[in-house]
Image (cartoon, grey):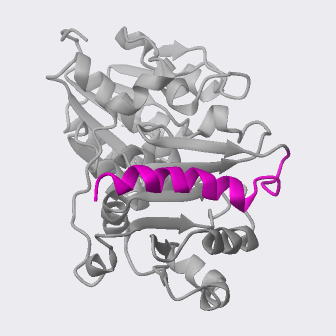
């Protein structure tokens, strides 16, 4: 894509929701950077999404929304004024954010027509209805780049714009667990309610279908999920390693990048794996708005299986194992 000039010297991307949503917003940053290489890009996000945002090489600076909330309204606006931002894009509609960005005097403020408060806080409105659209979430985000003169990218091209690299290394106590002669597979059973979850019994049956001599299997999860999964993990075979609650997000991003594959429902780690370029399999129901056409992982080696109902019970362990075995055959060529 040709390099061009833009009147915007410092663009702020605003997305203050969950990890998976943020990951699917990062290609916007890489896309902008590919066309306007001299622009500065900042990203307004939550504390817990900071490790993901900082892993995107296209982002110059992270601005912590949680820190801004500790300030008075006028001080929030003043803190942004010092950054000389002249374009803000509200990817995730947030009334508080929209108000203090307008108060900061940012000259171009892009939002959607579907939020009434954007009519009073933004001066560039884009018609966008996520509920009614057939576009993928990452493409819906790019619709908001219309005022910058950038068209929505074809879905198959979007993963090229992640520019995603971990900012830390795998912890020394964790790194030796990664095998050099087996396929390192992460199973992430829970989703913090962000996705429909595959039954634990199905994960257990999947493990039984994968030969221990070929697969090095990890169960991942947050500190909160550690207690939920403890009794179940206790019953799993010896070649399965429990990593729940053992890494912060910076470390987990790096661990995912150094693994060979990951299986999960529609949750943050699924999209991190896809952005990292490893083998990724998402498990999705067929119902809107959480179907794979909207939320499938995007990556060079990413794919998904879709159920025939609002739950995942029709996705069999054998179907998942068949996908993973094909990954393993590919990986055998690299060892």
**Left or right of 278 in this view: 82:** left
Q: Nearer the viewer, residue 190 or 264?
A: 264
Residue at the image position 49 percent from the left and 79 percent from the top = 244
222 w.r.t. 120: above or below: below
Q: Which residues are magenta?
A: 309-335
Q: Is residue 104 visible?
A: no
The answer to which quarter of the image holds residue 110 is top left
Residue 213 location (% of width, % of height): 46, 76
Q: Quadrant of the N terminus?
A: top left
Residue 268, compared with residue 155, is above or below; it is: below
The residue positioned 31% from the left and 80% from the top of the image is 174
Q: Residue furthest left?
A: 38
**Count of numbered marks:** 0
Between 108 and 328, the residue placed more toward the observer is 328
- The residue lying toward the viewer, choosing from 149 and 324, is 324
Is 279 magenta? The answer is no
Q: Position of residue 89 (x, y in %)?
A: 41, 27
Q: Position of residue 293 (x, y in %)?
A: 65, 31
Q: Position of residue 224 (x, y in %)?
A: 57, 78
């Amino acid at each position: 894509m040709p390099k061009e000039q833009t009147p915007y010297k410092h663009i702020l991307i605003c997305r203050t929701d969950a990890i998976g949503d943020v990951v699917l917003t990062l290609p916007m940053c890489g896309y902008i950077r590919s066309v306007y290489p001299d622009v500065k890009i900042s990203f307004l996000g939550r504390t817990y999404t900071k490790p993901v945002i900082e892993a995107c090489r296209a982002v110059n600076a992270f601005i912590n929304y949680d820190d801004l909330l500790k300030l008075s309204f006028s001080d929030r606006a003043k803190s942004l004024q010092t950054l000389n931002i002249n374009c803000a894009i509200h990817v995730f509609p947030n009334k508080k954010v929209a108000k203090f960005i307008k108060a900061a005097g940012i000259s171009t403020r892009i939002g959607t027509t579907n939020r009434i408060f954007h009519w009073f806080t933004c001066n560039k409105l884009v018609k966008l209805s996520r509920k009614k659209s057939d576009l993928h979430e990452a493409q819906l985000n790019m619709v908001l780049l219309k005022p910058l003169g950038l068209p929505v990218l074809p879905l198959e091209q979007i993963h090229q714009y992640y520019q995603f690299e971990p900012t830390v290394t795998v912890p020394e106590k964790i790194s030796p667990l990664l095998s050099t002669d087996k396929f390192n597979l992460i199973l992430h059973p829970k989703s913090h309610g962000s996705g429909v979850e595959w039954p634990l019994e199905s994960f257990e049956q999947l493990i039984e279908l994968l030969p221990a001599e070929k697969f090095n299997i990890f169960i991942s999860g947050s500190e909160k999920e550690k207690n939920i999964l403890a009794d179940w993990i206790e019953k799993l075979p010896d070649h399965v390693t429990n990593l729940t609650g053992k890494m912060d997000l910076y470390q987990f991003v790096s661990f995912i990048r150094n693994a060979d594959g990951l299986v999960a429902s529609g949750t943050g780690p699924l999209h991190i794996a896809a952005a990292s370029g490893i083998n990724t399999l998402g498990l999705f129901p067929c119902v809107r708005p959480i179907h794979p056409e909207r939320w499938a992982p995007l990556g060079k080696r990413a794919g998904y299986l879709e159920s025939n109902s609002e739950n995942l019970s029709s996705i069999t362990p054998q179907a998942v194992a068949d996908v993973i075995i094909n990954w393993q055959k590919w990986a055998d060529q690299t060892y």
